[in-house]
Amino acid sequence: MNQSLARIALAGTLILGLSGCEQDKPTSYLIPKEERNVTMPVPAADPAKDGLSDTAVASAPGTMQVLPGMQAAADEAGEIAYTVPAGWEEIPPSGIRKANLKVADENGSAELTVLVFPGDVGGNLANINRWRGQVALEPITADKLPEITENYTIAAHRGLYVRLEGGAQSILGALLPFHGSTWFFKFQGDSGTILANEDAFKAYLDSVQMVDHQH
């Protein structure tokens, strides 16, 4: 009788021991799985999938980054009407571009692009330094802005005229805050062509009318 009880007790102990081992197995398996999830590398961003392009943000010298949603914001910003300067060629705008014009003369060629982005896209200094990088000019500090800019009225709104005379390339431009967005008028190309067409560029800016259906 005592031997039978001993056998039953031993069997019970073995069963409990086996059950405990089975309960421990999932716990010991989950620990490395959790560690793998924590240390798994994050895939690099794919510009094509993220809707980015080489057109636009003042995050890197000479470039802007068009973030997802900017196309919709550009569409909602309205359109512009303007007079094309004599001798200039108008090209149908595409994407976030609101206007695209070209001119060529004995000095070379230049292109005018008009873009609009929500907000101030980093502010005047960041945007002007981005433009400076595009014509191989060094960045400047805020106290130098008055030397290369002047207030300029566009479509009855106060904008900022920018003159960046580089070496081979130069930029004439204007920045116009308008209903929570900023319009960028950039005339860039061979320096001789840019400077010879400054009056035509200003005449273009003077002809601009904002067609805003949202306000």
Image (tube, rainbow, N blue to C red):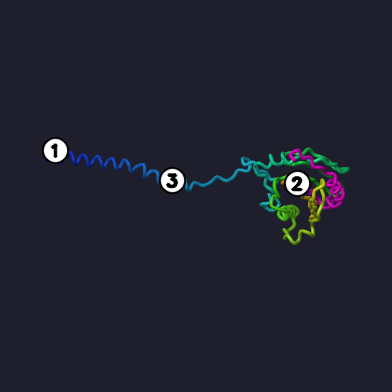
Pointer 2 local density, CA inside 10 Å: few below 14, some 14–19, many at least 20: some
Q: Secondary structure at mark 3?
A: helix
Cα separation between marks 1 and 2: 95 Å
First along the sequence among labels 1 and 2: 1
* Image location of residue 93, percent across then percent down: 76, 39
Pointer 1 local density, CA inside 10 Å: few below 14, some 14–19, many at least 20: few
Cα separation between marks 1 and 3: 46 Å
Q: Which residue is mark 3?
A: 34
Q: Which residue is mark 1?
A: 4
* Image location of residue 183, percent across then percent down: 75, 46
> Please, what is the three-letter code of the amino acid marked with disc 1?
Ser
Residue range (magenta): 186-215
Contact between marks 1 and 3 (CB within 8 A): the answer is no
First along the sequence among labels 3 and 2: 3
Contact between marks 3 and 2 (CB within 8 A): the answer is no
User: 192 or 117, which is in the foreground?
Assistant: 117
Q: Which residue is mark 2?
A: 178
> Please, what is the three-letter code of the amino acid marked with disc 3?
Glu
* Image location of residue 176, percent across then percent down: 77, 49
In front of the other: label 3 or label 2? 2
The residue located at (86%, 47%) in the rendering is: 203
